[in-house]
Image (spheres, helix red, strand yellow):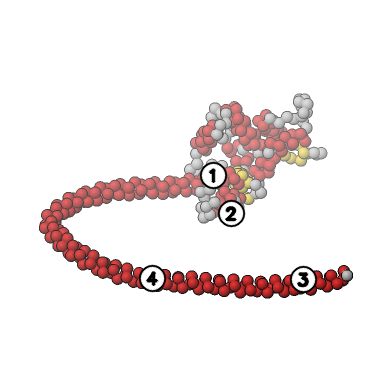
Amino acid sequence: MCAARNHPVLKDLHLGPCEAYGYLTQGGDSRIPGVDDRADFEELLKALQMLGFDGKQISEVFRLLAGLLLLGNVHFENGESSSAVSSESAQEISRLCSEICIKPNDSKIEFEFEPKRAIQQLRACGVLETVRISAAGFPSRYPYEEFARRYRVLYTKEAAIWRDSPKRFAELACQQCLEEGKYAVGKTKIFLRTGQVAVLERVRLDTLAVAATMIQKTWKGFVARRKYETMRRSLLIVQASLKAFLAFRRIKYLQMHRAVITMQSATRGFLERRNYERIRNATIGIQAAFKAQRVRRYVEKLRYEKSAITIQSAWRGYAARREQIAKRRKVVMVQCAVRKWLAKRRLRELK
């Protein structure tokens, strides 16, 4: 922002050089070799416009950031009875209140300031949290999900860790790319010292460049292999056509050469088949006569056996019925005798 302070979007904020702000000079030199802050600002502005931010929303975002820069220039000192703001910082506080729109009191009365109300507004805007983090030397902070989405190319040992566990991914990526003490792991965000975002961006761009080179190399290899395969298939087609022509000529010669042999083979085959059919038909006739005689004998035998079985069945049935009738008659005679005896005894009892 300071490098692009003359941009039409930032012109009304009256920003100064980066050396004029305490938050930007805590880590020493605020400029990073090889990094064009103005070009980065142009890219950021284009990205916000692509995301659908209108001019008013973009101005509010940069106004809030300018207010945070001004807040870093506020210095507090102890007075006789209570904390007081130095006269040098009074102008900075006034500019801060106008930049982030902090009301000094709910009644909008001039020259009346309510500290508790102002602190509540600062806390609601996230200014106090930003001041605390920036004071600790970590001006840059990212939610784990956003950090993982942007820098997922920095750690590729586990493919899906950036999506499944963004916090673990942020720790591993920072351990791999940054020095110890240049970052801090929070509960929901990762905090980076001044200049570390540029380091991550440089590593990210280098990784993407290597990946792009690999993709280009793979694509060029694929195109070259496809061209080679096309040429190879064309050559094979030409060779196959030539071989087919030569083979056709040889086949024609062989057909004419073998025509006589084919006719001789057909004639000999016909004669042999006719002789074979004659012998085969005679053999089949003899076998059929023999089998018919054997079948007739077998059928005659079955007929005799069936007749004998029928006679035996009839006789056994007759004998069984006769025996049954005899037993029945004896039972009836016994029943009649018993009934007669019972009737006589009953008659005697009645007399």
Q: CA distance from mark 3 to mark 2?
A: 126 Å
Q: CA distance from mark 3 to mark 1?
A: 118 Å
Please, what secondary structure does the residue beneath circle 4 have?
helix
Check disc 4 and report the residue beneath it. 300
Q: Looking at the image, do the residues carrying marks 3 and 1 touch, with CB atoms under 8 Å apart?
A: no
- Residue 180's tag is 2
Residue 241: percent from left, percent from top: 20, 49
134 vs 235, left or right, is right
Residue 38 visible (yes or no) = no
Q: Tag 2 or tag 1, which sits nearer the N-term?
A: 1
The type of residue carrying mark 2 is: Glu
Q: Tag 2 or tag 4, which sits nearer the N-term?
A: 2
Q: Looking at the image, do the residues carrying marks 3 and 2 touch, with CB atoms under 8 Å apart?
A: no
- Residue 150's tag is 1
Q: Mark 3 or 1, which is nearer the eye?
A: 3
114 vs 75, left or right, is right
